[in-house]
Amino acid sequence: MKAVGIRGGKGSADALFIEDNVADPVATEGRILVRIHSFGLNRMDIMQREDKYPYSLLPESGKILGVEFSGLVEEVGPQCKSDFKVGQRCFGLAYGGAYAEKISVSEDMLMHIPDGLSFETAAGFPETFFTAVQAIHLIGDLHPGQSVLIHAGSSGVGQASIQVARCGGADKIFVTAGSDDKCTLCKSLGADFAINYRTCGDDDFAEVVHRETDGKGVELVIDLVGQAYWHRTTKAAAMEGRIVIVATMSGAIVDKFSFRDLMNKRLWVMTTTLRTRPADYQKKLRDVVIERILPHLAKREVKVTVDEIFPWSEISRAHKKMESNSHAGKLICNIQS
């Protein structure tokens, strides 16, 4: 088969190329072989491409980039217990290997594509929505009627988190974003308050949260930013609030950090990753996604914002766009054999 390779094993976006004669994956016990139609890009792909991943990946990740995909079932491996059949449309999450014509993936990480949903849209769903469901429900334990603050609201995970929180019965949803257009997008997805951190001045997110919650604060924070917002994040959190750190886009080292800021409000701080979770955890998460979110996706009550679709021959350009931060939604590649 063909797959995206990296010249020299690591490098810039220009090092990416379509490699021929890559060994075909095999549908071994409990696994399904999928012929990929589309795959989604994620920031972790850049880190892996540059060999700068912040922690060790599992052996299952392999050398081929990509963790989310859509396509057609080509072969069902022995001992599979799911209802997938050859020729059916499917999408899912993998430890790696999605930048390729074919992938062998555990049947426990696959889902049926809802009727009428495009391959491109389906390919942009798994990573962001699995991450959002994990942060909001499995880790953050959102209860109906609670308020939520989501940093980087226009990012893929941010957009998914807005919708997952709304489906979960959140009362008020606050988000931060970097432009008026991105704030408008967040509101269209269900955010009640969107704060443009570039233009808000003194009326920043902590002030808006304080004002709009009558000084109570939010019960749950989904933080993808980290260092730059930390002190204001703790200020915005309610007494006994929960802060779930999903990413640290601005940095991981906090100046003038004090445990007292946490203790004074009895705050819970939790961190999470997804890609290195064991298979049984990922199956549990997939099942929660199917139960809580897939029905809403099928009814188009949640949506995946696709910023641009590239032919996979333009994978370098797609990576460069992701690095530029000029997009507001998923970047998708279609495979052209």
Image: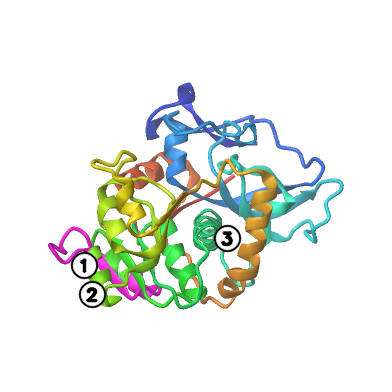
- The disc at residue 207 is 1
- The disc at residue 215 is none
Within 10 Å of the Cα at label 1, are there few (<14), some (14-19), or many (20+) other Cα atoms? some
Does the residue at mark 1 contact the one at mark 3 (Cβ under 8 Å)?
A: no
Of tags 2 and 3, which is closer to the observer?
Answer: 2
Q: Examine the rendering and report whether any part of residue 41 can be seen.
A: yes
Q: Is residue 188 magenta?
A: yes
In-image side of 79 versus 291 (left or right): right
Residue at 53%, 75% (x, y): give it: 300
What amino acid does circle 2 point to?
Answer: Arg
* Image quarter (top left, top right, bottom left or bottom right) of the N terminus: top right
Return the residue nearer the eye: 138 or 59: 138
What amino acid does circle 3 point to?
Answer: Phe
* Image quarter (top left, top right, bottom left or bottom right) of the C terminus: top right
Q: Secondary structure at mark 3?
A: helix
- The disc at residue 119 is 3
Q: Which residues are magenta?
A: 186-205
Determine the CA span between mark 2 and mark 1: 6 Å
Residue carrying label 2: 211
Position of residue 234 measured from the top left corner of the image (x, y, whole percent): 31, 57
